[in-house]
Image (cartoon, rainbow, N blue to C red):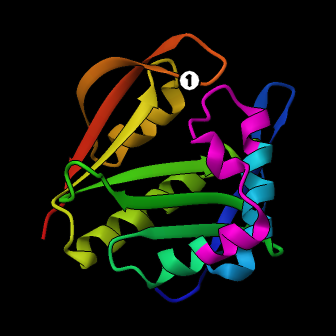
Amino acid sequence: MDQRVKRLRSVFLKHGRVAMTSEVELTLKEADEKDAQGLLKMLNQAKQETDYFIIDERSLGMSKEVLAVELTRIKESTEHLLFLALINEQVIGVVSVAPKSELTEQGEIGISILKEYWGMGLGTILLEEAIIWATENENFNTLVLDVLADNQRAIHLYHKMGFQEEARSNIELIEQDKVPTIKMKRTIEA
């Protein structure tokens, strides 16, 4: 996947209202070994900014060197995607697709965006890229994800992008009790 440059509408809150400012140049690219430090920094910041962050704690504890090796493996894989959004070379968002271990025809999506960039359309851009990649890749017939049941912004985005609710359950998060989640899926159309 080639590197792309898109425009992200920059917004800010002014007296409780959203106001448009200038557009920001956004770079989209597949992650590679050179992105390890920036990705770790972004993920650790995102974890601090929201209660909706679901990630394996081992991933956040990886060294930059170990993550660099993992990013190389992911980039060379035909069944994994790790796509980054950058502004001025700073990682501000990420979307991933990986096969589910028990159902390899399903690609599991993960997405995270720094809070400063919420509400600017970045989630839509990243999910579109993941859906395009999965459609062209032909390894998956379905994309799936888990979302915390009270994360209404994310649920709205997923519905907008064609995901449907499949099931509800509770998952145990580290340092928390079980929390309600929604399993969602989207069929890949060839």
Residue 67 is inside the magenta segment: yes
Q: Residue at x 62, y 24 (%)?
A: 174
The answer to whether residue 14 is left or right of residue 174 is: right
Q: Residue at x 79, y 35 (%)?
A: 48
Residue 87 appears in which quarter of the rendering? bottom right
Q: Amino acid at mark 1?
A: Leu
Read off the magenta span: 46-69
Q: Residue at x 48, y 60 (%)?
A: 96
- Mark yes or no: residue 30 visible: no
Residue extending farthest to the right is 15
Position in image of residue 141 (x %, y %): 15, 60
Q: Residue at x 58, y 53 (%)?
A: 121
Q: Observer-nearest residue: 63 or 104?
A: 63
Q: Which residue is labeled 1 in the image?
A: 173
Residue 80 appears in which quarter of the rendering? bottom left
Position in image of residue 92 (x %, y %): 73, 59
- Mark yes or no: residue 83 visible: yes
The answer to whether residue 146 is left or right of residue 137 is: right
The answer to whether residue 67 is left or right of residue 162 is: right
